[in-house]
Structures are given as C-alpha cells and as structure tokens.
Image (cartoon, coloured by chain):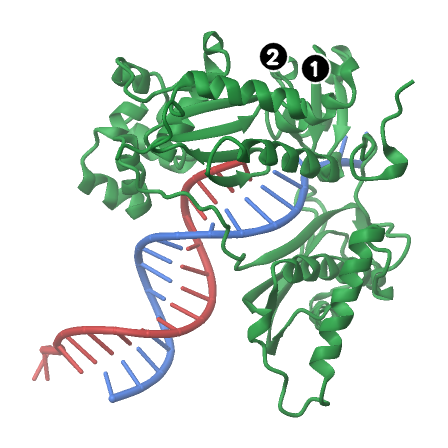
Chain colours: A green, B blue, C red
Amino acid sequence: MEEVYALVDCNNFYASCERVFDPSLEGKPVVVLSNNDGCVIARSAEAKKLGIRMGAPAFLFEELLKKHGVRIYSSNYPLYGDLSRRVMDSLRRFAPEMEVYSIDEAFLRLTGMAGAGSADYARRVRADVKRWTGIPVSIGLGPSKTLAKLANKIAKRDGQHGGVFSIINHPFADELLDTVKVEDVWGIGRQYGKLLNNAGISTARRLRDAPDRWVKKHLTIVGLRLVWELRGISCVSLEEAPPPKKAIACTRSFGRHVESAEELREAVAFFTTRAAEKLRAQGSAAACLQVFIATDRFRPGDPQYADAVTLKLSRPTAYTPELIRRALRCLDTLYRPGYRYRQAGVILSGITSLGDVQPGLFDTPGRETKRRELMETVDRVNRTMGRDTVRCGAEGVRKPWGMRQRKLSPRYTTRWSELPAVR
DNA sequence: TCTGGGGTCCTAGGACCC
DNA sequence: TCTGGGGTCCTAGGACCC
C-alpha cells in the first residue's frame, strides 16, 4: 500500500509560544535567545524579514533589534515544553500512529485512512491545533517521511498554500523538486551540500535521480536511503516510542567566567544532578561518566585550556550522590588554576536498564534497594513541589556561575504563581 | 560586556584473537 | 625477498538533526 506521511511543524515555535500568552506581540518582531541570552534561536516572521539570522549572536544585532523595537526573550523551556505537550496531545487525535520528532515537530502516519492523505484533512488538523493551543503549524504530506518534510518546506515557503501542501501524486512533482535546493533536503547539511553542488547535483530532483552507486560511495548508506525516500519509496519508518537514550548530557556555558575550583565543583555537581534525573526518568543507569571543562574560545587572547576525563564505573548506577562523588574526582584531575573557565559539562553513557543492575557482591545487604527508594522519593518530591526542592549540598545555593536570563517571560502554564491574570 | 545545548548514526583504523 | 584470512570490539572523527 502507498504510504502517507504528514509532517507537522510548529511555525517559529518558541516565538509563537511567547505570543500565546501575550497577544500584544501579534504582528511584532519577536526573537528568542539561547541559554545565556547568547544567540538568536527563534524568530517570528517579522523578525526574519528584518534579516536577523538564525543562530546570530545577539550582541551583534543590538542596534537593529533596538531600532525596530524587536521584543526579545530568554529561552523559557518550561513554557515551551508544556505547550509542545499540548500540541502533541492535540495531534494524537488525528492519527493512530505518530512520532514526536522534536519539541516542535511530529510525523503522522495516515496510510490507509480514507481521505486522511488529503490537503483538506490537513487543513482541519491545522485549524484545530491552532484553536486548541494557540500555536500555528504547517503541514506537509508525502509518500515518505523525507518527502513529507520537503512538502512541509514548500508549505512554509509558498504562502499561497495556506500552510498545507501535499506532494502526493502531484502533477508537477519534478518541477517542484527542482525548486528545492539540495541542501534544504532533510539529511543534507552544509558539507554534503557542498559536495553535491560540486558534483553538479544542486536540487532535490537531481539528487533523486543520482545513481545509487555514486550516492552510496559519497553519502554512505544513510544518503542512499534518503535518495530512495525522495523517489517515494519509504525506507525510514515511524518511531512511535523513542528508544532509551544511549547518552545523556548536561553541559552549559556559564553566565560569567569562573576561576575557582569551588565554583566549578558546584557547577559540575549541579550538571551531574540534572543528568542523573534524566537518566532515572527513562529508567536507566550509567556505567560511564565523562566530565569536561573549557575556557572561553571566543577570547583567543586569554590562555586556553580544555580537557575531558572519562571514568568507567565498576557497576552502572543512577544514584546521584555517587555520580557526583565520581564527577568531582574527575574534575579534580582536570582542574588547572589560573584559567578563566567558560563551560563545563557531564555526559553519562554506557547506559543500561536500571532493572538489570545487580547489587554488588560485597555491598551491605539492601543498600541498592535503599538507594533506589531514596532517588524515587527525591524525584517524586521535586516533581510535585518543584525542581530542586530536595537537592545535594554540593550544588551550592547562589549559583553565581548560573545562566544569564535577563528577558525571561513567566512560566505561565507550569507555576501557579506565574499564571496569567485576566482583569 | 556579549557567541547554545543535546542528541543520532556511520565509517575507518587499530588492537586483539584464533 | 617472501609475509593469510577472518572476526570482534573499541575509539575517534565526521556527518547529520532539532
């Protein structure tokens, strides 16, 4: 049977989230900044028109932002995460099979649903999501995930489609594929884009028609799969339940430079706590822990130093105090005084299911069970009473190295104290 | 003064084994 | 001078995604 996929993508997601609870932003240029208010990571349509590039360092655009009265926001992930969940819950009503692909995208598999592959159906989905959540979305339909992605791009690019476009059985599919630059195809990034352009393959159509052997040789098996998908042969299946992550990281740039071992230790302990939370949330334990620290690479005049230490544990664990203890020992071997550090991180890998971990032979009987119960309790308290209600002292309290978030909007939907008030 | 964070997969090459 | 064949595991590096 002919496959039918829809790719639903929230328009300018973070900027749209800020708008949902502040209608005064309607029609105004809005940008959302990355952690530490560093780069622009989301722009409303009006902001795009001003020529503000994705990923642009905000400080380079200060003049422009001020001149045009651009409304600027720090990233508010509790808000975006919650609105994302609402959008996904809405979408689930329209398709029996769905893959949540990212915070702002989902694939729906509509294969075999009468009428569901039509642009009309997609338009209804679009209208309902907007009404239920306030978030505008675009929808692309195609016989493979790659073509659904591409159709979505066209839906967004060409205004006349009203945010919905289907490439299924399209009479001018060849011509359409010729209007899409090869580097805009899902899976073709900067490097492959360059390589393909040099080989005279400049559009999606040309890539679709490239010889298999050449593609396999230069773009590996992944590229070959992609080319087949462009031909309408579905090779990338829907992943309804995401497999457990194989690596879990928490890494941050600091809000200011950090020199003292003490502050660095606090930060690393804090990152370890976050990583361990994510680990337990997916029911896993980690057998491998990596810690890295780095100075500010954007200040080449400063003395530079960056290094990482990886530690293998004898037994996988998800017990925060033990992970912190190990991470701090790694840090002690890494730390060199006399540098201005800008970044640090903790990466957990060697991940196994927590249920498979056996207690150590020489451990005090019941120790493992006790540890797990403790972590479960801590997680439960923090989930219901708010993050960091219970935490390790090693994380510190003031967090002077913490993120800069000068333009944070309220957590409208996840904190009682920050609910929007209607007068 | 000011430049994000967190993932995935594939391949090549080296170590080691029989 | 000549110098097998095949397998596994691990790591580093490079590509990609949002």
Residue at position x 49%, y 9% from top?
A159
Marks 2/1 same chain = yes
Quickly name the residue at label 1.
A29
Residue A377: name its quadrant.
bottom right
Instruction: Pinpoint residue A283: horizontal percent, then vertical percent.
Output: 61, 63
Is A331 positioned to the left or the right of A310 in the image? right
Residue at position x 29%, y 31% from top?
A230
Quickly name the residue at label 2.
A49
Q: Nearer the viewer, residue A189 or A307?
A: A189
Asked whether the beta carbons under mark 2 and mark 1 sit within 8 Å of each other, the answer is yes
Instruction: Pinpoint residue A393: horizontal percent, then vertical percent.
Output: 87, 65
Question: Does residue A8 lie above or below A127 as drawn?
Answer: below
Is A141 positioned to the left or the right of A262 in the image? left
Q: Amino acid at mark 2?
A: Lys
Question: Does residue A150 lie above or below A274 as drawn?
Answer: above
**Residue A184 visible here:** no
Residue A206: name its quadrant.
top left
**Residue A354 visible here:** yes
Residue pushed farthest bottom?
A362
Instruction: Pinpoint residue A81: horizontal percent, then vertical percent.
Output: 68, 39
Graded by Cα atoms within 10 Å as few (under 14), some (14 to 19) or many (20 or more), the crowding at tag 1 reads: many
Is A259 positioned to the left or the right of A134 in the image? right
Q: Secondary structure at mark 1?
A: loop
- Number of marks in the image? 2
Q: Nearer the viewer, residue A72 or A306?
A: A72
Residue at position x 54%, y 56% from top?
A245
Instruction: Pinpoint residue B6: horizontal percent, then vertical percent.
Output: 61, 50
